[in-house]
Image: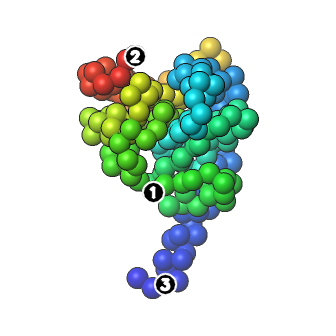
Amino acid sequence: MSQGTVHHIAESGFQTAKLYDQVRPSYSEEAVKFLIGKLGIASQNASSNQPVRILELGAGTGKFTDILHRVLRDGDVEIIGSEPLLSMREVFEEKFPSIEMKDFPAENIGLPNNSVHAVIAAQCFHWFANEKSLSEIQRVLVPGGKLGLVWNLPDYSVPWIKEICDDVIFPLYAQSNTPNVYGGEWKRMVIASDKFGH
């Protein structure tokens, strides 16, 4: 493969990731504050002279990271992003040069044992809901550390959204056998693993 072809593929992936970043919904500050409250991040921060370390798995282009960073900007908190797709990492690093971004999948987390206080997966856990990733998450969490999972879901009370989901989105998922949040396999995996409370 020529250098020009490699450059074209990389550039194409970057443009696709930029488009993803532009059209993917963001998160509300209220949702992020609710999650970090459930994870006990604020209380950990107040009771320790060590920075709170948060690993965000599958951080993508940083849609969740952006709000998380904004909400926690006044605290002693270190956010580490991880994303196995190069094009996504490139957009993330362009947007957040001060936040560390790692290249590893959830099944092989490149961090030491007991090194983070919380692991968060926003809009992505269904892609790696398996025993290997849950074991790796448990390994890198400090004793008493927490796993937080969050998704943006459609508002089914809006008739046209419900119709699109029922007539288009759900049938596409069923036909393609693509991992998704709606089937609940991710939840069954977490409960069956018995590694985390729920």
Q: Quadrant of residue 183?
A: top left
Q: Which mark is residue 3?
A: 3
- Circle 2 or circle 3, nearest the eye: 2
Q: Quadrant of the N terminus?
A: bottom left
Q: Which mark is residue 103?
A: 1
- Residue at (28% x, 21% y) in the render: 194
Relative depth, front residue between 159 and 124: 124
Residue carrying label 2: 198
Q: Amino acid at mark 3?
A: Gln
Residue found at the far top of this picture: 157
Cβ atoms at labels 2 and 3 below 8 Å apart: no
Residue 98, relative to residue 124: is it above or below? below
- Spatial distance from mark 2 to mark 3, Cα to Cα? 49 Å
Q: Which mark is residue 25?
A: none
Relative depth, front residue between 30 and 25: 30
- Residue at (69% x, 28% y) in the render: 28
- Residue at (58% x, 61% y) in the render: 90
Q: Taking the image as drawn, is residue 153 in sight?
A: no
Per the image, label 2 sits on a secondary structure element best described as loop
**Left or right of residue 127: residue 28:** right
Residue 148, relative to residue 11: is it above or below? above
- Spatial distance from mark 1 to mark 2, Cα to Cα? 28 Å
Per the image, label 1 sits on a secondary structure element best described as loop
